[in-house]
Amino acid sequence: MDKLAIIGGRPLYGRLPISGAKNSALKVMVACLLTDEPLTLTNVPDLADIRQLTALLAQHGVEISRDGNTLTLHAASISSTLAPYDLVRKMRASFNVLGPLLAREGEARVSLPGGCAIGARPVDLHLKAFEALGASIELDEGYVIAKAKGGFRGAKVTFPFVSVGATEHTIMAATLADGETVLDNAAREPEIVDLANCLIAMGANIKGAGTQTITINGVDKLGGTQHMVLPDRIETGSYAMAIGITGGELTLENARADLLGAAISTLIECGIEITETENGLRVKKNGGRIKGADVVTQPYPGFPTDLQAQFMALMATADGSSTIKETIFENRFMHVPELGRMGADIHVDGQVASVRGKPKLKGAQVMATDLRASMSLVLAGLGAEGQTMISRLYHLDRGFEHLEEKLQNVGALVERVRNQN
Ligand code: EPZ
């Protein structure tokens, strides 16, 4: 299996383009099932997760073509309403085909996604929302068998806690419902606004995306459109933290400060200088060590769980101590022992990790455990003394487009070593 070899200690300088957001692209791609006209998406990153979803959509009868970062998806007709276990288990976002299939075809059989490394990740909120919209749901042999003959009916749905996936999924389902759907305690992530904007361009009637109350008035039909996926805020935050670790100055092209929520003030508080430029963000560290800061992961606009692991790598070499509390997923500290192998001083007690910063980490052989954890090891390796060798790269390939090329172009010593045992 491939490994990533990193020789640490080089400051990064230059321009680094930020790709389209994986977690937005995956949702807008699914929206193609809601119309028989072509949906063209630009700024779609070339990632393993995107290819995985492409395979599932093709299996439902969607014709798909890719030209660079432009993807055209045409679901002229749906050839199958079955989403099999093998395709759904590899990537949880695949579960979000359920709502659109039900809205368009009145029935679907979709595998339950199952747990994953960072937690159990149930889909009960999705299913309760669909029941509220009039669907009948049965669970059989690991599959959701759902029916909504005659389509969904508008309803009021109050989520007991904030869920990004359930909010997005219910918005899509409600676009073709009969009447008005009101979602309360909805997630406010920028990816939800991006999905709503795409659906609105397709003819949907959605108000309030980006706030905690979203109102969707069902329409009879959606049509095709062209939509540009918004830039990846998690990739942006990760490379900004890289500068905090290595020093130097990067221009993160296409990055948007307004998408970063609480992460931006935390990074500034730590001593990373961030300024907006005409088409991106300039990120800089002015000598000295980064200062320790405390964070609690929260739904947007709070500090994102998807940056927690990377922030821990930053804190591992900060001047002072910090506490990092993970409130979204129950098992998202698997990077801690790996960072420990590099010399990081981290103690976990339940949901809280306490980090005592050290001037330097030391390169080591480490193992990626999930997507964002992999990036924390890359960041730690970029700042460490000597060589870091990261195994299980398939996690990284799920969500960071052209990682080695982007880092090499700004001066990092990073190389993919093929087929290492
Ligand atoms: C999305 O996952 C992202 N994935 C995650 O990114 C991200 O970490 C997460 O939102 C939070 O921001 C995609 O967009 C593809 P949730 P999602 O529903 O939608 C619980 C990455 O690295 N829950 O907001 O699955 C759930 O278990 C990934 O790119 C239920 O209990 O997250 C979790 O504890 C990882 N029942 C919490 O809610 C439900 O029905 C929030 O999950 C749904 C969720």
Image (spheres, rainbow, N blue to C red):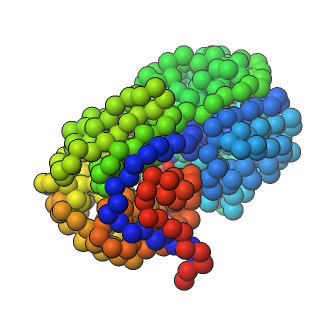
Instruction: Give the x, y percent position of residue 191.
Output: 52, 34
Instruction: Give the x, y percent position of residue 415.
Output: 51, 68
Q: What is the quadrant of residue 103 in the picture?
A: top right
Instruction: Give the x, y percent position of residue 298.
Output: 33, 40
Which residue is found at the position 79% from the left and 49% from the top? 58
Kindly give the residue lying farthest to the left in the view shown.
320
Which residue is found at the position 57% from the left and 40% from the top? 20
**Up-down: is 285 above or below 377?**
above
Name the quarter where the C terminus is drawn. bottom right
Which residue is found at the position 15% from the left and 54% from the top? 319
Q: Is residue 76 left or right of residue 210?
A: right
Name the quarter where the N terminus is drawn. bottom right
Of 359 and 265, nearer the camera is 359
Of 26 and 103, nearer the camera is 26
Which residue is found at the position 77% from the left and 26% from the top? 224
Instruction: Inspect this view and state whether residue 108 appears.
Output: no
Instruction: Give the x, y percent position of residue 267.
Output: 28, 41
**Up-down: is 257 above or below 81?**
above
Q: Is residue 349 left or right of residue 89?
A: left
Number of marks: 0
Of 146 and 415, nearer the camera is 415
Q: What is the quadrant of residue 68 in the picture?
A: top right
Instruction: Inspect this view and state whether residue 193 appears.
Output: yes
